[in-house]
Image (spheres, grey):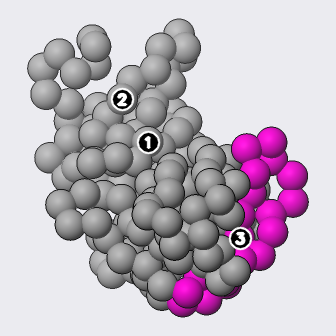
Amino acid sequence: MAESDDWLSVGKIVGVQGLQGELRVNPASDFPERFTAPGPRWLRSRQGGEPTEIQLKKGRQLPGKSLFVVRFEGINNRGAAEALVGQELLVSADDRPELEEGEFHLLDLVGLDARLSAAGPSIGSVTNLISGGNDLLEVTTADSRKLLIPFVEAIVPEVHLNEGWLLITPPPGLLEL
């Protein structure tokens, strides 16, 4: 997940929808308003570089899917939309929604140590987040193995942001995959 101190990646443009310039976005955010509320967003090309501002006019979630369909100002046909496929959708890093008790910004989890018990040693560090149907934490162990841990309360029951660690209670065999 490409991040800097100034930007948060909230999704990736993965395709066009129809002929009128609508785009499909695979979200990397649990906040639907990132894709539905009009206002400024930024796009960063696959090659990286400085993001360019674009105005989100409207958006909607596809029924039964995690994809959103968005419309940007000035993108009015399929050709213009196709030129944006593959770009990252960004928001300003200071544009973070307020959270309820027990909620977390997923990006804050990167860098936390993963432990099997509160007093136990670290089994690795959260190095990436994979968004999809369910969020996965990628934990890299000391021997460079990559473990994919579903970020659900049954498996990650405790997150201690201030202390820099989270507790995982994996089902049998998960850590051996």
Asked if 20 appears above or below 170 in the picture, the reply is: below
Q: Residue at x 42, y 68 (%)?
A: 69
The answer to whether marks 3 and 2 mark residues whose Cβ atoms lie closer than 8 Å is: no
Side (left or right) of 74 relative to 159: right
**Nearest-to-viewer mark from 1 and 2:** 1
Q: Residue at x 55, y 87 (%)?
A: 57
The answer to whether marks 1 and 2 mark residues whose Cβ atoms lie closer than 8 Å is: yes
Taking the magenta stretch, the answer to whether it contains residue 72 is no
**Nearest-to-viewer mark from 3 and 2:** 3
Asked if 49 appears above or below 54 in the picture, the reply is: above
Q: Position of residue 98 (x, y in %)?
A: 45, 84
Taking the magenta stretch, the answer to whether it contains residue 41 is yes
Q: Residues within 10 Å of mark 2 (few under 14, many from 20)?
A: some
For marks 1 and 3 on the same chain, the one whose residue lies earlier in the sequence: 3
How many numbered dots are placed on residues in this image?
A: 3
Q: Quadrant of the N terminus?
A: top right
For marks 1 and 2 on the same chain, the one whose residue lies earlier in the sequence: 1
Range of residues picked out in magenta: 38-57
The secondary element bearing badge 2 is classed as strand
